[in-house]
Image (cartoon, helix red, strand yellow):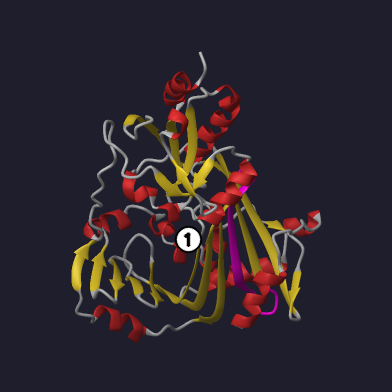
Amino acid sequence: MIKILFAITTVIGLTLFPASASLQKKDAILEKAIDKLHQNVNISYDYLTKTDNYFNSTFTVDSGSLTRFRSAGGLHKFGFCAKQKQVAYLFDGIHFSKYKHEEKVKVVFDEGEIQSNESYFENFIFWSQSPFQLANMEGLVKLEDKFVEDRKFHVFLKEQMRPSMSDSTQIIKYQGFWFIEEESNEVSMIRNITILENDTLQKVEQLFNNFAFGNYNKTTIKGLEDLNYDVVLAENEYPELEITPIRIGQKVKSNKYVNIHNEETIIYGEDGKSSLIVFGYIGCFACEKAIKDLLMIYPNLKKDINVFYSSFQNKNFAVGKYIQRKKLPFVAFGSESNMMVDFQLYTSPSFIFIDEKGFVTYIEEGYNQEVKAKLMDILLIK
């Protein structure tokens, strides 16, 4: 079955077309799949997750199993056990814990938050992108059916437009494609795509197989509960990062860094010029706005300032594609340059002005109308 599921991801591309209006209103296979989820609380399956983060040039593959079971107590009326290679999650209807096997640590989440928030588990991808979400989903549009190795799949789309949580002026498009196998009436794949303007920021594919309905294996849950791991509260799971950002008056550690074309580039003092380095990353909405504004004024920039772009986290090849697509006239640096190690910045975007001798003369962090006005005042020819 895994072979079939991988075939779905390769044979079925992103171009899917709406079905006829009558099929959009009602689909028997969809109704059967939803009924199956409503009628069975105790459900288990295996899953494979492929996450392609275009915004930071990372690709991950994860796999595991999930079991949902009925729970008599608590707000949610269900429990679940999600098992991955190095991590497992157990929710018994009241208590929620994460088991980190390599570190032998049990992370305990706040019970009060869980019991007061019906959407609490939406923060976990194994739950928010699970077949269970289909049971209460509205607004699905029927697309063309697809055939993969003689198996028929009914395909549905749920599309939403929502403001970005980090910048309400930016509208994000979320597309969720649901693939339901006709023979089994089971969700075989969910493909979620996040789009900003014409740029795809992320694609996540969840593939499902080995469904079982009815009884569940209680020994799996008992095995987790019996683990003698050190207990840590969720709020203390990760230590705070100690970062010392570069400050005004400091001299940068180096005047040369390797750009996205693997060429050494002098970042200050060339021809007696000062410099502006714009630090950001692909998918950062405020960064996008700043880049657009810089492009608009670029012909009128002062001639004694060189402008560079450096990514917080994107690798050279991704930054190269980004620069080409956006038609940016800047010399750019990817994460391989290790500029972030020297500059130690944590706000995106950040604007670092450096004089011809390598000393930082001005810093702006974030981007809004006030920051824009300050930057224009420094950069534009009077």
Q: Assign the N terminus to one quadrant of the image.
A: bottom right
The span picked out in magenta is: 181-199
Look at the image and tell me whether residue 97 can be seen.
yes
How would you rate the neighbour count of disc 1 (Cα within 10 Å): few for under 14, some for 14-19, many for 20 or more?
Answer: some
As for residue 127 lying within the magenta part, the answer is no
Residue at figure coordinates x 43%, y 52% from the top left: 337
The front one of 77 and 52 is 52
Left or right: where does residue 59 sit relative to residue 115?
Answer: right
**Magenta segment main secondary structure:** strand
The front one of 43 and 88 is 88
Q: Position of residue 95 (x, y in %)?
A: 27, 66
Look at the image and tell me whether residue 169 can be seen.
no
Secondary structure of the residue carrying tag 1 is: helix
Left or right: where does residue 102 sit relative to residue 273?
Answer: left
Left or right: where does residue 231 sit relative to residue 20?
Answer: left
Quarter of image, res 111: bottom left
Residue on which the image places disc 1:
128
Residue at figure coordinates x 58%, y 73% from the top left: 36
Q: Position of residue 69 (x, y in %)?
A: 41, 74
**Taking 170 as reference, is 57 above or below it?**
below
